[in-house]
Image (cartoon, grey):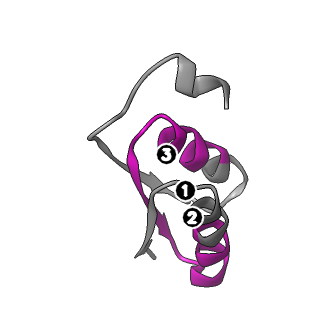
Amino acid sequence: MVFSNKFQLTKKIAVVTGGAGLIGTTISHAFSEAGAKVYIAEINREKAEELINAMHLKNLRAEFVKLD
């Protein structure tokens, strides 16, 4: 992703609300690629887990947090 060259988030935590949505997915990937551990706060657990599994395949750090 382009953003990882612009800034570093190593040793940082990012919470992305709606993190498995259209825009949230891009933000979740960008923050994780920049070094952050991303917590995907989402109401839709299945959608979030799909995203997290895809991110883990790329060795990106992400976890699910239930949000309603």
Q: For the view shown, which residue lies furthest in the right direction?
A: 22
Image coordinates for residue 29, horizontal then vertical, percent? 59, 46
Number of marks in picture: 3
User: Of marks 3 and 2, which one's residue comes earlier in the chain?
Assistant: 3
Q: Are marks 1 and 3 in contact (CB under 8 Å)?
A: no
| Residue 43 lies in the magenta-colored region | yes
Circle 3 packing at 10 Å, graded few (<14), some (14-19), many (20+), is many
- Say which residue label 2 marks: 56
Q: Amino acid at mark 2?
A: His
Mark on residue 59?
1
- Say which residue label 3 marks: 32
Q: Please, is residue 67 above or below residue 9 in the view? A: below
Q: Are marks 2 and 1 in contact (CB under 8 Å)?
A: yes
| Residue 24 lies in the magenta-colored region | no
Say which residue appears at 42% left-offset and 39% top-offset: 35
Q: For the view shown, which residue lies furthest in the left direction?
A: 11
Quarter of the image with the C terminus in it: bottom left
Kindly report the distance in space between the C-alpha atoms of the residues bearing marks 2 and 1. Answer: 5 Å
